[in-house]
Image: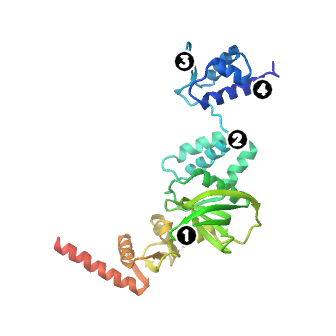
């Protein structure tokens, strides 16, 4: 009897897989697919019900077996890729990237981690370590692209993809190093093989990402968080401002998103913000919205923009 148990369990799981694949199956169809009698199918259906799966059955023409919605969540049947995807998402939620889900994600992740095979647990750990989160307000990205890149980062595997940049689309060949989530977007730090330099890529601008199978030797890479932060807050912009804020470093960084710019401590009560922008007037208005007093260190053109905006606001206040 013990020797037949694994076969019975495998058949029950195969039955569950079939019931999930389409709305209704007849008993005869299931018996033929699994190579057993309809009586065995009825017994296996009863076993699924004992496990908590609500299997509905109807007799007569047009009847059959149907997997319904139950009052409690039964054990899940997941493929390797599905288990890894669920675990990675739970890791991100547990880290606070999804508001309100942290505590529940930690509990669920603990349960899933107990039953994951060692090889899948190692893959989840590797993918999680390949991702850096600067803040929790992250936008939705294509899960296939995310997993392809995360696995390539872990396995040091070259990747090709189509990239839609503001100046046009192009095919890219890269060596991926780290993914960074910040400012409602995902970014990839990678070494661009065609441009022979480090680059930052937005995941929402990628398509057709494919791991090539070619391994690469690890290079001396820049700090991923600092590189991406500079790339998205300073490098692409026409103007770069340096502002001395009259507030401690910890206070400012707790309220200012990393995508705005880089902040460095300047003594115990002050810090310096370096931020980029294409329009000085817009930069002046953004700085005015900050809750702290500040002094503009550079550029002098920003001071002129602040005066213009101050005069405009005063005229509006007087007219009102």
**Looking at the picture, does residue 164 appear above or below residue 23?**
below
Frontmost of labels 3 and 1 is: 3
Distance of label 3 from label 1 (alpha carbons): 60 Å
Vertical relation: 180 (above or below) 302: above
Question: For the residues marked 3 and 4, what is the alpha-carbon distance in whole angstroms?
Answer: 33 Å
Q: Marks 2 and 1, Cα distance to the nearest angstrom? A: 35 Å
The residue pinned by badge 3 equals: 62
Where residue 126 sits, quadrant-wise, is bottom right
Q: Which comes before the other along the chain, label 2 or label 1?
A: 2
Element under label 4?
helix
- Is 73 displayed left or right of 125 in the figure? left
Q: Quadrant of the N terminus?
A: top right
| Precedes in sequence: disc 2 or disc 4 | 4
User: Mark 4 and mark 1: span between their CA atoms?
Assistant: 53 Å
Quarter of the figure with the C terminus: bottom left
Q: Are marks 2 and 4 in contact (CB under 8 Å)?
A: no
- Give the image's coloring scheme: rainbow
Q: Residues within 10 Å of mark 4 (few under 14, many from 20)?
A: few
């Amino acid at each position: 009897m013990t020797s037949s148990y694994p076969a019975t369990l495998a058949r029950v799981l195969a039955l569950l897989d079939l019931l999930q694949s389409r709305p209704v199956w007849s008993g005869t169809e299931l018996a033929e697919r699994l190579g057993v009698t309809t009586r065995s199918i009825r017994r296996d259906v009863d076993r699924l019900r004992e496990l908590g799966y609500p299997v509905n059955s109807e007799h007569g023409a047009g009847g059959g077996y149907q997997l319904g919605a139950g009052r409690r969540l039964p054990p899940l049947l997941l493929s390797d890729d599905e288990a890894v995807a669920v675990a990675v998402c739970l890791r991100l939620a547990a880290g606070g990237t999804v508001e309100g889900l942290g505590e529940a994600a930690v509990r669920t992740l603990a349960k899933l981690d107990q039953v994951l095979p060692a090889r899948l647990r190692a893959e989840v750990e590797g993918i999680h370590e390949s991702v850096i989160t600067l803040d929790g307000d992250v936008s939705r990205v294509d899960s296939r692209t995310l997993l392809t890149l995360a696995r390539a980062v872990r396995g040091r595997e070259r990747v090709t993809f189509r990239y839609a940049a503001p100046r046009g689309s192009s095919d890219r060949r890269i060596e991926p190093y780290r993914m960074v989530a910040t400012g409602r977007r995902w970014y990839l730090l990678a070494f661009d093989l065609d441009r022979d330099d480090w680059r930052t890529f937005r995941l929402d601008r990628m398509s057709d990402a494919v791991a090539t199978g070619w391994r690469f030797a690890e290079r001396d890479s820049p700090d991923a968080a600092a590189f991406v932060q500079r790339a998205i807050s300073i490098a692409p912009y026409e103007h770069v401002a340096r502002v001395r804020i009259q507030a401690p470093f910890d206070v400012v960084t707790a309220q200012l998103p990393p995508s705005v710019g880089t902040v460095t401590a300047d003594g115990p009560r002050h810090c310096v913000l370096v931020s980029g922008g294409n329009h000085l007037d817009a930069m002046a208005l953004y700085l005015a919205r900050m809750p702290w007093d500040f002094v503009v260190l550079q550029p002098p053109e920003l001071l002129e923009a602040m005066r213009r905006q101050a005069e405009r606001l005063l005229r509006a206040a007087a007219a009102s």
